[in-house]
Image (tube, rainbow, N blue to C red):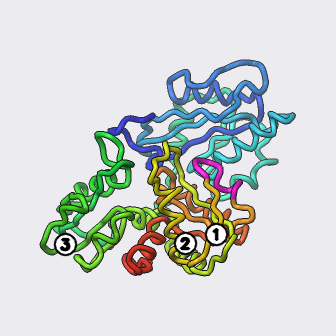
Amino acid sequence: MAGVNETPSANRTHIAFFGLRNAGKSTLVNAFTGQDIAIVSDVPGTTTDPVSKAMEILPLGPCLVTDTAGLDDEGALGELRVKKTLAVLSSTDIAVWVGGGFEEWRSRFEGIPVVVADRGIDAGELRRKVASIRLEESAPGLLDGLAKRGDRVLCVCPIDESAPKGRLILPQQQVIRECLEKGILATVCQPENLPDGEFELVITDSQAFAKVAGKYPRITSFSILFARQKGDLAEFRRGLDAAARLKDGDLVLVAEACTHHRQCNDIGTVKIPAAVRTLCGAQPRFVFASGKDFAAKLDGAKLAVHCGGCMLTRREMLARIAAARERGVPVVNYGLLLQKALCGAAGAFPAD
């Protein structure tokens, strides 16, 4: 697990190595990173699960380098390995294909810059090729268009039973860091200690909407900011409308990007289902997903409720939204759902 002072994986450029079995991917990954992070063997199929290493590559900056299993793996276990390898594509910013056979798989890499590398390529040359790729920056900053240098922003950060000991949760960390970078004056408090005064923007934990609503005119949540940065607010608002139409027995998928220990008053398993029941006035059924199993649990669902996605890249979040859309499942974000259920607002701020 990365330390709290390290760049989160979701904010790194994801570089993944692909190819057929025994193409030399793991050898090249080790040379590329300068460390032995992958087991190397002449036996085909040595790499089973994706293996990742965080590093810095200038001028790209913080990166996450991932080794994957061969896409031509065989047998029952081989099919599972290939499935895990293909799942890496949803978060890949730059792909490195090692050896031959790329043409057969080209369609899978649509929209992803690909560097095709010979097995014996010099690692330094490969790093230069990868570093020369200019990625389109489509994700806005968390506070772009919402606050500017000199503005006062209030961050409402509850410290309750679900708060990690000794630190702030990642969305709070990143918002406060962006305030510092942009010269925005950030005030941090708990819901019980809301200060008087005027703020250009108030950002609250979704669960504290009811306490904050009415005291300040411009309120949003950390979750909504991440939905705006990484997801699709318009899509989430359509999902919010669908939540109000749920009926008894309808299946609702509640999904979180990461796995964590469940608390007795857990937001995903307790508070989100309660908010859904409040909105629809019915008794839907709920199924829960953590980590990578989002798409696998969409079948049969009438609604998917997703966390803010602070641990996902924008590409991966958009891939999840696309997977839900393909199955005809509306998606809503934790923050919008809680804001509507707790204080009757449908997330009118910030605008799309």
- What amino acid type should be assigned to the residue bearing mark 2? Arg
Kindly identify which residue carries mark 2: 277
Callout 2 touching callout 1 (CB < 8 Å): yes
- Label annotation for residue 199: 3
In the image, residue 87 lies at what x, y percent? 67, 47
Instruction: State which mark lies toward you, 1 or 3.
Output: 1
In the image, residue 340 lies at what x, y percent? 44, 76
The structure residue drawn at horizontal position 59% and vertical position 69%, both measured from the top left corner, is 331
Secondary structure under badge 3?
A: loop
**Front in this rendered view, residue 192 or 205:** 192
Q: Is residue 116 left or right of residue 261?
A: right
Q: Is residue 49 magenta?
A: no
Q: Is residue 84 left or right of residue 211?
A: right
Graded by Cα atoms within 10 Å as few (under 14), some (14 to 19) or many (20 or more), the crowding at tag 2 reads: some
Q: Is 342 above or below relative to 13?
A: below
Looking at the rendering, which quadrant does residue 32 occupy?
top right
- What amino acid type should be assigned to the residue bearing mark 3? Phe
Whole-Å distance between the Cαs marked 2 and 3?
A: 33 Å
Q: Is residue 290 magenta?
A: yes
Q: Is 293 above or below relative to 141?
A: above
Secondary structure under badge 1?
A: loop
The structure residue drawn at horizontal position 35% and vertical position 39%, both measured from the top left corner, is 4
Kindly identify which residue carries mark 1: 284
Q: Is 122 above or below relative to 318?
A: above
Graded by Cα atoms within 10 Å as few (under 14), some (14 to 19) or many (20 or more), the crowding at tag 1 reads: some
Secondary structure under badge 2?
A: helix
In the image, residue 106 lies at what x, y percent? 75, 51
The structure residue drawn at horizontal position 42% and vertical position 63%, both measured from the top left corner, is 223
> In the picture, which quadrant includes the C terminus?
bottom left
- What amino acid type should be assigned to the residue bearing mark 1? Pro
Q: Which comes before the other along the chain, label 2 or label 3?
A: 3
**Front in this rendered view, residue 99 or 140:** 140
